[in-house]
DNA sequence: GCTTAATCGAGACGGTACGTCAGGTCTTTGA
DNA sequence: TCAAAGACCTGACGTACCGTCTCGATTAAGC
């Protein structure tokens, strides 16, 4: 059907695929992105380098897949009864994941590489970004079911909002963890959820200051 | 004092320093982080590789300095009369900067590298992170002067808040630009400022839904 | 007996054999020994690599057979009425053959390979060396029939002599053509025949000098 | 002067040159031509592969130089008082050399390679062929001094003759040793010297048969 | 006409070496 | 002492070919 069903020749070993991705993750844990080599991954997987290059054109694509598998497997949306609690927990889990040596660094490195490589960019978008956005979509749906958020009429606007939330949450955690190199702990998560739900003036000083200044600009919308 | 006062021998050429950083930026523009080579930088700067290594211990540190200089030179806080306007403009400027080939990629790559290199992490913190936090601090001060934000009593809490804001703004822009690979344009900036100042329920549907559900959890501090 | 009489199963394609040897020669012409690859030969022959390895254990053996077939097909002893004329003509023909890109190079390469490979050495001996010695044997017989050479009493000595002649003729032509990389033309062939039949002092200066000095050493034999 | 006298930069290590050629010869002895690898040679020489490739563009050129050095060092013309004795001894020595694993095979392989590589052919000619022709020239001179050979008037003809003798001797020994894979021993050397000095009919049957048939063809020069 | 078994094509596989490239160091001569 | 030049070692790169191995599909010979 969609894949033309290669009929002929020896079929690719599914075993090898698994071994390679596993070896990649193990190597990332031990060595980190920059010291990981294709030869080493091949050796760990008990596989020839050519087998590796037959499936992934380079280190970046391989690592994207390995990281994507990790994210798929590790990230699940909790259901703690309130949007705020779900956000806090998700932030903590995501931060914990990014702190793992195989995840955060690799993601950064791969994204850096992608700026010069359209194919890689596409692969990141499909296997990581789009797939993790499900968390935002699911979280919103639950919040709407609970009555915490209104149902949105315009689906385009809804999609835009989801993208925004995804970028804000993922971006903030990533930046805090990897760029600022500060810990994401429970207090931070609480403050962050507050900012996300109420705006930062609520955190900055007192609740009374917030509403007064945070008006939409007169000319907008 | 700080420089141990080298007295003897041929002094280092200040010309060389400038040429090297310039060449590094030019090379980053053309080639990007991963294809940039020390040999190439040296050649562009009309300098021997030795000279280069006498000043920076490795590629990463060199690039950190080049990027830091770029950020120092390009990022300034606008004063548009309101906190919201300042945030929107800053977001746009920062996004424009990250889109430049020498900036975003390099930053990501260098951060990725830093996860395994304490010295590099420190250099990033001092020459990039801490130095750009000035924008947040200055912005808050102005907003306080305008009466848009209250003066905070607890300096530790004030610092924490500033860090948070910095991570949220920088992180969101960075993630949108480089990971999601979507454009940061005026509408996005407007929405983002709205989230930042009022919380995301304000964007999600209608103002009425927001306040009702986004209460602090009962048991929290 | 010699073939273990495979009774059952699909028989090997004789077509394939021919196609492979042909493709090998074509590839040798185009690429030479060192750039010839089994995969390429298979592709040219429209045959799978497996088919190829089912018949020849490796590249060297395949090439030996291809070259042997070439020699068999191209080398024939002329009958020009005198030993000298036959020698000259044979030398020219052999040189012409060695100059062809598929012959000389391959022969050298295969011989080089054989020094570490007894099986290959044996194959060369049987399919090339012994088979081409027929030219020497036939030539001598004809010369004896013409009365140009005496019939030899001792068959062992006769064989030794034939071997010697074979090595001298083939070796000289091969060395001149491939090592010295000088042309074997009619004058050279004439001189060579002179040396072979009369000894080199006859060529060196004048006939008178030769016999006088080229005596067997007194103490030998 | 002729080399523009590179003044600047670290000079090439003469030590390395020696180590590499030595390692090459050692590797040839142990492994033979086809199993010798550049990486292995580099490792044995305690040198990086790049250092090796900086001096020789490929395996063949390296081996040519190694073999040339071997020949220079091992081949010397004996002076046994007569041309015949000198020839016999030289033949034996040359055969002994070719039998060594690093010499004969390598020479064949390199010559095979050279048929497709003009630069290599030139290198063989200058470093091996021309340099070893000295033996022929020297041998003739001595024989002339002894009165065994006439002095030749025409220098061009003299050169042609020397080339011929060189090809006949080297070619015969090489073919016997490597192609026919038969031993070159004292009896063979004696027979060969006889052929070379008196023509092969002298060996074939009786001396009386030789002169009668080995006349120059009527129509020639 | 069915069974049997070796052959065929295709192409993936584990290996080994290739020749290149970049990182970072060291050794010259010259300023 | 520093600078320019460039050789050096290290180690990874991605490719090429080797010879082997699985596939499913043929194709005769024997029953």
Image: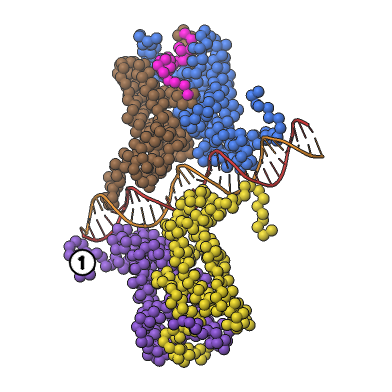
Chain colours: A yellow, B purple, C blue, D brown, E orange, F red
Q: Residue at x 36, y 87 (%)?
A: B153
Q: Give above or below for C138 relative to B142.
A: above
Q: Is residue D186 magenta?
A: yes
Chain holding disc 1: B
- Measured as percent of width and height from the top left, residue B57 is found at 32, 61
- Measured as percent of width and height from the top left, residue B135 is found at 38, 80
Name the foreground residue: B177 vs A101: A101
Q: Quadrant of residue A188?
A: bottom left
Name the foreground residue: A71 vs D137: A71
- Measured as percent of width and height from the top left, residue C33 is found at 52, 37
Mark 1 Cα-neighbour bin, 10 Å: few <14, some 14–19, many ≥20: few
Secondary structure character of the magenta stretch overall: helix
Q: Is residue C40 left or right of residue A104?
A: right
**Position of the N terminus of chain D by quadrant:** top left
Q: Residue at x 38, y 21 (%)?
A: D92
Q: Give above or below for A87 relative to B48.
A: below
Residue holding disc 1: B4
Name the foreground residue: C64 vs A138: A138
Q: Residue at x 36, y 40 (%)?
A: D44
Q: Is residue C148 left or right of residue B117?
A: right
Q: Is residue B74 left or right of residue D79?
A: right
Q: Is residue D74 left or right of residue A41?
A: left
- Measured as percent of width and height from the top left, residue D214 is found at 48, 14
Q: Give above or below for A49 relative to C44.
A: below
One can see residue D68 in this view = yes
Q: Is residue B186 magenta?
A: no
Magenta segment? D181-206
One can see residue B66 in this view = no
In what element is the residue under mark 1? loop
Q: Residue at x 55, y 79 (%)?
A: A82
Name the foreground residue: C219 vs D25: D25
| Residue closest to the far left | B7
């Amino acid at each position: 059907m969609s894949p033309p069903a290669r009929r002929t020749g020896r079929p690719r070993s599914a075993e090898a695929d698994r071994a390679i991705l596993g070896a990649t993750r193990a190597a990332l844990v031990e060595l980190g992105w920059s010291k990981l080599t294709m030869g080493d991954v091949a050796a760990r997987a008990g596989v020839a380098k050519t087998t590796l290059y037959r499936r992934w054109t380079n280190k970046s694509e391989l690592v994207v897949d390995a990281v994507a598998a990790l994210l798929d497997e590790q990230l699940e949306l909790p259901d703690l009864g309130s949007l705020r609690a779900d956000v806090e927990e998700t932030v903590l889990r995501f931060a914990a994941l990014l702190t793992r040596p195989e995840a955060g660094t690799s993601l950064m490195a791969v994204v850096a590489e992608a700026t010069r490589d359209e194919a890689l960019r596409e692969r990141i978008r499909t296997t990581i970004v789009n797939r993790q956005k499900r968390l935002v979509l699911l979280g919103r749906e639950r919040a709407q079911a609970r009555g915490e958020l209104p149902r949105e009429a315009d689906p385009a606007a809804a999609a835009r909002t989801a993208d925004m939330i995804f970028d804000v949450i993922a971006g903030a955690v990533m930046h805090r963890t990897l760029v600022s190199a500060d810990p994401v702990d429970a207090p931070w998560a609480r403050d962050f959820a507050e900012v996300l739900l109420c705006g930062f003036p609520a955190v900055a000083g007192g609740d009374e200051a917030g509403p007064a200044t945070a008006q939409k600009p007169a000319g907008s919308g």
